Amino acid sequence: MNKIIFIHLLNDFSGSPKVLSQIVKSYKNKNHDVELFTSKDEGFLSNIVDKHHNFFYKRFENKFLTLFSYILSQVHLFFKILFSKSNIVYINTLLPFGAALGAKISKKEVIYHIHETSIKPNILKKFLRYIVSITASKIIFVSNDLAQKEKFENKKSFVIHNALENSFLKIASKYTYSHKHENKFVVMMICSLKNYKGIPEFLKIAKQLESHNHISFRLILNAEQDEIDKYFQNQKFENIEIFSKQKDLEKFYSASSLVLNLSRVDQWVETFGLTIVEALAFGIPVIVPPVGGPIEIVEEGLEGFLISSYEIDKVAKKIAELSNNEITCINLSKNAKEKALIFSEDLFLGKIQKVVDG
């Protein structure tokens, strides 16, 4: 039986560690010998395996400190993987290059699971792509769009869409969509605390619809409360509730009427969009970017709408329309629930296993 080491850089409550946690738990449940290396932070990868190794990595406001932290983490991973006893090193995202180099030198099989395309600066992205090109034996992409954009010549490549956990789908399947919640049409967005995720646009849309008393907004940020306070600098919002990072999002989805993804199409291309699929599972209509992975999930007018976050007026107008049209939202909801069934965890894990074991 193969021993597998899984690598992820920043453990938090975002999409890529959540996806990796599904894979790791699947192999653990089948009694495989697995180890996990990730940062010390609290996130989806915390406490899921016995052999869990932490290293120091932190994102600072000072870019040079972040770079130093990043390089230090990769030196640590390089030596840990170089001298580890394993057959396969499974690297989640492009970033952990130290693990890939350590694995290659020690003649271990390297599998990359690539989730991202928007890496800055460009010189870093070129370097990381070069490392993949000389170390990877197999590459998994999370969408067809990403596989086309980040194609590697002469590499075994697979497209495997992310999936929803069976436990999540079970909860979501019991939920019946409600157009209003306590007489409010609730518009929710879940994202990282980054401008390119569309936070300024979200605030502008909420401001534009402030006079619509039946519409309220919820912003759930993958950040600690002190980081959020610093970002907003004590700004007060009439119609927006803001929440810090959440592990269990089911209660928020079940209290939402519409879910937004406002990632800026020229700064951060969503290669998949796990929160989009989670919303669909609850039967919640969505408004998402018209590029990248979302166009493989959402069809215009069926489960939601494809609108760029730069078209603030258009997004605001669509929200106002939907808030006054329950029948349209219910039809979108039915289609959304049907679409979500495609993203089955069992199917996803079966495909992953074929790549890893094949």
Image (spheres, helix red, strand yellow):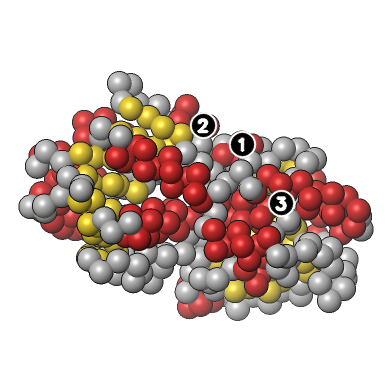
The part of the image, by quadrant, that contains residue 119 is: top left
Q: CA distance from mark 1 to mark 2?
A: 8 Å
Indicate the secondary structure of the residue bearing disc 1.
helix
Relative height, residue 203 to residue 328 (above, below): below
Locate residue 64: give its quadrant: bottom left
**Residue located 78% across and 63% down the image:** 176
Residue 144 circle label: 2
Q: Which residue is mark 1?
A: 296
Residue 117 in view of the camera: no
Task: Look at label 3 and name its amino acid.
Answer: Lys
Left or right of residue 88: residue 334:
right
- The answer to the question of whether label 1 and label 3 lie on touching residues, with beta carbons closer than 8 A, is no
Location of residue 235 in the rendering, given as x and y in whole percent from the top left corner: 64, 75
- Asked where in the image residue 188 lies, by quadrant, the reply is bottom right
At which x and y percent is residue 102?
14, 45
Q: Label 3, secondary structure: give it.
A: helix
Q: Which percent across, then down, holds residue 13?
A: 46, 64
Name the residue beneath numbered marker 3. Answer: 337
Residue at image x 18%, y 55%?
Answer: 77
Image-based side of 228 in relation to 78, left or right: right
Disc number lying in front (2 or 3): 3
Estimate the spatial distance between the alpha carbons at disc 2 and disc 3, rounded to whole Å. Answer: 22 Å
Label 2 sits on what residue type? Asn
The residues tagged by marks 1 and 3 sit, at their Cα atoms, a distance apart of: 15 Å
- Say if mark 1 contacts mark 2, CB within 8 Å: yes
Residue 357 seen from this side: yes
What label does residue 148 carry, if any?
none
> At which x and y percent is residue 236?
68, 77
Dot 2 or dot 3, earlier in sequence: 2
